[in-house]
Image: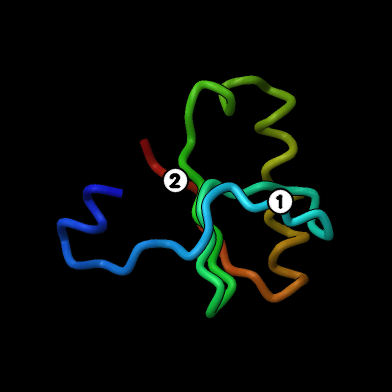
């Protein structure tokens, strides 16, 4: 958040909202444009989570949301 704020970028509208229709909880969400922001961490190192990520992405895209996996 410091990087975004310090760089003059707009901060997300919501933090960790549950998007129940899509079975996911992005780290941050921009309401206009329906943009999800995920910040990968140790939780995503588990194989079962790595398999779930493409399914979540597909559900979000089908619903009109945009998301990109983070690069750490």
Q: Residues within 10 Å of mark 1 (few under 14, many from 20)?
A: few
Residue 62 image offset from top left, x and y in percent: 77, 70
- The alpha-carbon separation of the residues under discs 2 and 1 comes to 19 Å
Q: Is residue 60 left or right of residue 12?
A: right
Residue 11 image offset from top left, x and y in percent: 35, 62
Q: Quadrant of residue 6?
A: bottom left
Position of residue 6 relative to residue 47, above or below, is: below
Disc number at residue 18?
1
47 and 18: which one is in front? 18
Outermost residue, front side: 14
Among numbered discs 2 and 1, the one appearing first in the sequence: 1
Q: Is residue 34 left or right of residue 71?
A: right
Q: Quadrant of residue 57?
A: bottom right
Q: Secondary structure at mark 1?
A: loop
Residue bearing the label numbered 2: 70
Q: Quadrant of residue 53?
A: top right
Residue 30 image offset from top left, x and y in percent: 51, 68
Q: Secondary structure at mark 2?
A: loop
């Amino acid at each position: 958040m410091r990087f975004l704020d310090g760089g003059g970028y707009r901060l997300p509208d919501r933090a960790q909202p549950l998007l129940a229709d899509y079975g996911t909880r992005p780290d941050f969400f921009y309401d206009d444009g329906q943009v999800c922001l995920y910040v990968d961490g140790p939780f995503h190192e588990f194989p079962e989570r790595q398999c779930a990520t493409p399914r979540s992405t597909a559900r979000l895209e089908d619903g009109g949301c945009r998301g990109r996996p983070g690069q750490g």
